[in-house]
Image (spheres, helix red, strand yellow):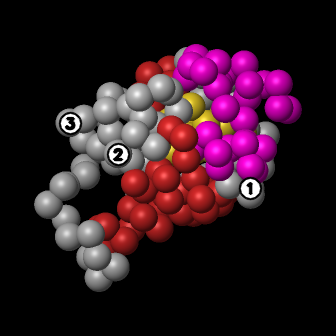
């Protein structure tokens, strides 16, 4: 397993699954579920595409004209397009509006596996979209690993 974090170059050997970790990042609110999830795939032939940027600066203006911010968003969009699988996690104590946007963008992709536990403020919306577009949902993040290998 290798982990590529934003804004590093996205590459794979061709024999590895590329797995993008979409979902709650809200610094100071969301747990670092990306790191925890990636550790469960240790030893597997996968490349984890993790948008949780080590040098993120929350003071960056969220504008198309801000090169650092634009680099982050462009990296995430490219990573989701290149990924074989997009794991999406909604933490109940977050709003995660960008994750909702990404759910809509990639609902028809056939790449999504979604974890949206009880308590997430828009769980009903997420469940309906997943049902409509036949997106796989799991009860626990730990269930995703088994699902990854069953979809091969």
Q: Nearer the viewer, residue 135 or 77?
A: 135
Residue 151 pos. (x, y %): 83, 32
- Does the magenta portion include 141? yes
SS at circle 1: loop
Asked if 32 appears above or below 100 in the picture, the reply is above
Residues shaded magenta: 126-152
**Crowding at mark 2 (Cα within 10 Å: few <14, some 14-19, many 20+):** some
Residue 47, can we see it? no
SS at circle 2: loop
Q: Nearer the viewer, residue 34 or 23?
A: 23
Tags 3 and 2 in contact by the CB under 8 Å rule? no
Residue 74 pos. (x, y %): 47, 67
Pointer 3 or 1: first along the chain: 3
Q: Quadrant location of the C terminus?
A: top right
- Does the magenta portion include 148? yes
Residue 58 pos. (x, y %): 18, 55
Q: For the point 60% across and 21% down, which residue is it? A: 139
Q: Circle 2 sits on which residue?
A: 95
Residue 141, can we see it? yes
SS at circle 3: loop
Badge number at residue 109? 1
- Whole-angstrom CA distance, mark 3 to mark 1, is 31 Å
Q: Circle 3 sits on which residue?
A: 28
Pointer 1 or 2: first along the chain: 2
**Crowding at mark 3 (Cα within 10 Å: few <14, some 14-19, many 20+):** few
Q: For the point 40% across and 54% down, which residue is it? A: 97
Residue 69 pos. (x, y %): 31, 67
């Amino acid at each position: 397993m290798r982990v590529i974090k934003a804004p590093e170059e996205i590459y794979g050997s061709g024999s590895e699954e590329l797995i993008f970790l979409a979902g709650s990042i809200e610094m100071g609110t969301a747990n670092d579920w990306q790191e925890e999830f990636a550790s469960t795939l240790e030893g597997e032939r996968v490349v984890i595409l993790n948008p949780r940027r080590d040098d993120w600066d929350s003071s960056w203006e969220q504008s198309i004209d801000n090169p650092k911010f634009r680099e982050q968003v462009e990296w995430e969009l490219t990573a989701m397009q290149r990924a074989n699988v997009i794991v999406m996690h909604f933490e109940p104590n977050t709003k995660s509006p960008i994750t909702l946007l990404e759910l809509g963008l990639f609902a028809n992709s056939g790449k999504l596996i979604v974890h949206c536990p009880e308590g997430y403020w828009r769980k009903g919306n997420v469940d309906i979209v997943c049902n409509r577009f036949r997106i796989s949902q799991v009860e626990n993040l730990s269930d995703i690993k088994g699902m990854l290998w069953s979809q091969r």
